[in-house]
Amino acid sequence: MVRSRTALKSKAKTSPARTKPAKPVAGADSLALTPKGEAVRERILTVALEAFARSGFRNATTREIVEAAGVSLPALKYYFGGKEDLYRACAEAVVDRYRAQMDGIAHDARTMLAGRPSREAARAQLKALMHALAILLTGSKEAPTWGRFIARQMNDTGKGLEILQKQLWAPGIELVAQLIATIGDYDATSARIRAIWLISNAMTFQAGRPILLQLTGWRQIGSEELKMLFAIIDRQIDEIG
Amino acid sequence: MVRSRTALKSKAKTSPARTKPAKPVAGADSLALTPKGEAVRERILTVALEAFARSGFRNATTREIVEAAGVSLPALKYYFGGKEDLYRACAEAVVDRYRAQMDGIAHDARTMLAGRPSREAARAQLKALMHALAILLTGSKEAPTWGRFIARQMNDTGKGLEILQKQLWAPGIELVAQLIATIGDYDATSARIRAIWLISNAMTFQAGRPILLQLTGWRQIGSEELKMLFAIIDRQIDEIG
DNA sequence: GGGAAACTGTATCAAGTGATATAGTTGTCT
DNA sequence: AGACAACTATATCACTTGATACAGTTTCCC
């Protein structure tokens, strides 16, 4: 399980064995990164995220990724270390993005909960929270990529790749569960189940996207369709309690 | 893209070139199958379904499958032709199983619809239908396998493998949509969206199963938990119209 | 401008994997 | 028993794919 880049260099090498003691990775391991290098790293990360979202970890090939990024194979090793490290970097990028989008409204919800809100106030807050999540997962321009990547995470489990997933979902589920418990009288487990249910529903439009688009004749999920999604979510929240 | 087994035999072969004209596949292509062979074929199909459900098409290896089935690699070729053919056979098996489980109740629903049922009758019928689907997808003993396989189908698209998927979902969605349209006043598109929504929800417990089990402390989705799932589905159906 | 660090590309390796040629064994029918 | 079809296993091939050795180029600081 230990990354190969940090060990494995026991054989004596004459030429550059002193300048790069343990073959570190650019950008990590306290290695400098020029603005140009940063841009390249970013470009690789972007196309990798798309590739992983589209094809999954195994199906996406490093060659396909580096070609799309306009670099050569060793660039991947240079900037990330390996395919798995690249995947992890993508997952971290998703979590960061998710946090950036949700932290504000999540914080609002938490402070509200601390102040013993009324049922209806909690209900309104939950709607706002779920709308933000729905936009993030299905409505935004990058949703097909980000949403699919997240959805795949649930299945592409195994290595150590699902850790970020828990880091992403667990807090959200807990928060939603607390809001639900405030709205209605639920024990912790029931509230959590409903929370999982509600959040999963927001992902449903992403998972079923191909079928949905095909059957409805939509070209994409636009603002009109998003309104319909909001309406369904709201009715589901109204039905709580 | 043409399967190799049917062509590719141009070089003159002296020994058995007459008895097996085009290298057919046992069980298909009008080739006999002894009871013993049938059992082997079935065993391969079962373990393959589990493997594909667990790992997806690409990650599941033919070696892993044949080893689990206690046969050797060429048996796969002999009985199915190739990995893709095996996958297709699995998909067909799933569709068959799904049909066997759902056809009865689906037929009931259709005959009822033909007779201009009342809203409440349609509602009850929809509940029964969705309960059956929920049991099939999450509650039955084989659900972890069958449900996961179906869920993966939606992502593992590409080759020609999603055709069966449409064959499986499209009729179900149409039926549910008609029931929904009977319960409430919806245009075709709205009814279809709600239908997709409802069906996706039944799959949600399968997709989010790991998270669900972890957060609730459940060991598996048993009858108690299924009752809770039914309750949520019912409330969602009650909310229609 | 000299040198070191940052960066890039070519060529190749090694493992995994689907496929299959070929030869063998078992079963069944006459 | 003989013959043919049904079935099975060993040994390989061909290709994909992640990784990387190595040599080169660019950039930037003194």
Image: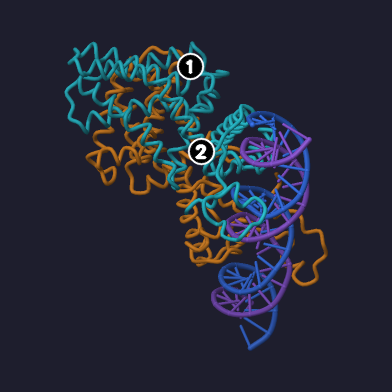
Chain colours: A orange, B cyan, C blue, D purple
Q: Position of residue C17 (x, y in %)?
A: 63, 48
Above or below, A201 relative to B16? above
> Which quadrant of the figure has residue A203?
top left
Identify residue type, mark 1: Thr
Whether residue A123 sits left or right of residue B138 in the image: it is: left
Q: Secondary structure at mark 2?
A: loop
Whether residue B123 sits left or right of residue A47 in the image: it is: left
Which of these two is toward me, A143 or D4?
Answer: D4
Residue displayed at 75% across by 54% down: A7
Q: CA distance from mark 2 to mark 1?
A: 55 Å
Can see residue A162?
A: no
Question: Comparing marks 2 and 1, which lies closer to the viewer?
Answer: 2
Residue named by callout 2: B30
Q: Chain of mark 1?
A: A
Q: Position of residue D16 (x, y in %)?
A: 58, 57
Residue displayed at 40% across by 21% down: B133
Q: Secondary structure at mark 1?
A: helix
Identify residue type, mark 2: Ser
Q: Chain of mark 2?
A: B
Are marks 2 and 1 in one subunit? no
Above or below, B77 relative to B69? below
